[in-house]
Image (cartoon, rainbow, N blue to C red):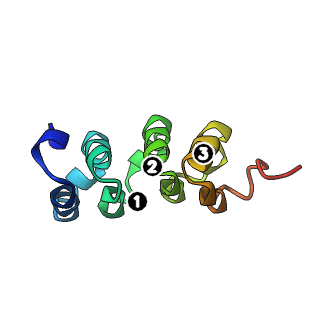
Amino acid sequence: RLSWCFHKPEVEHLVRYAPACVRKDRTFILAAMRRNRKSYLYADKTAKIWQDRDFVMRMVQIRGNTLEYASEYLKGDKEVVLAAVKEYRHSIRHVSKTAGILSN
């Protein structure tokens, strides 16, 4: 398991220099995030994983500001947004403006 093999700085380095196909892998990124919350910085932000609700929900629960990289649709998902804001209140700035979540 990734979390047992590497120390926090090593995990960040591992993700940073991993092949592109690995930086798109949801299992790898989630495992890295559990060990080092900065790992998301090197995940592929254009990968389809950011359209996967389960993946995004897990990511925002670990680090709320990862909502920034979610698909526009998920930035408007009330549950995802609430999980992100609960973890990091400033995540609210990444909520979809067109979703109507922030309206009265």
Instruction: Tell me where residue 69 appears, x and y as whole percent.
Output: 48, 58
Q: Is 102 placed left or right of 56 in the picture?
A: right
Residue 98, image quadrant? bottom right
Q: Are marks 1 and 2 in contact (CB under 8 Å)?
A: yes
Residue 100 is situated, as x and y percent measured from the top left of the image, at 79, 49
- Residue 102 place in picture, x, y as percent: 79, 52
Looking at the image, is 53 positioned above or below residue 22?
above
Residues under labels 2 and 3: Cα distance?
19 Å
Report which residue position mark 2 lands on.
50
Closer-to-camera residue (99/9): 9
Q: Single out the residue that lies furthest toward the right.
A: 104
Residue at the (18%, 63%) spot, across then down: 13
Measuring 63% from the left and 46% from the top, which residue is drawn there? 81
In the rendered image, which quarter contains the N terminus? Answer: top left
Q: Secondary structure at mark 3?
A: helix
Residue 25 seen anywhere in this rendered image of the structure: no
Q: Which residue is mark 3?
A: 86
**Residues under labels 3 and 1: Cα distance?**
25 Å
Residue type indicated by callout 1: Thr
Q: Which residue is mark 1?
A: 46
Res 49 seen here: yes
Counting residues from the start of the chain, the first of labels 2 and 3 encountered is: 2
Horizontal relation, residue 35 to residue 18: left or right: right
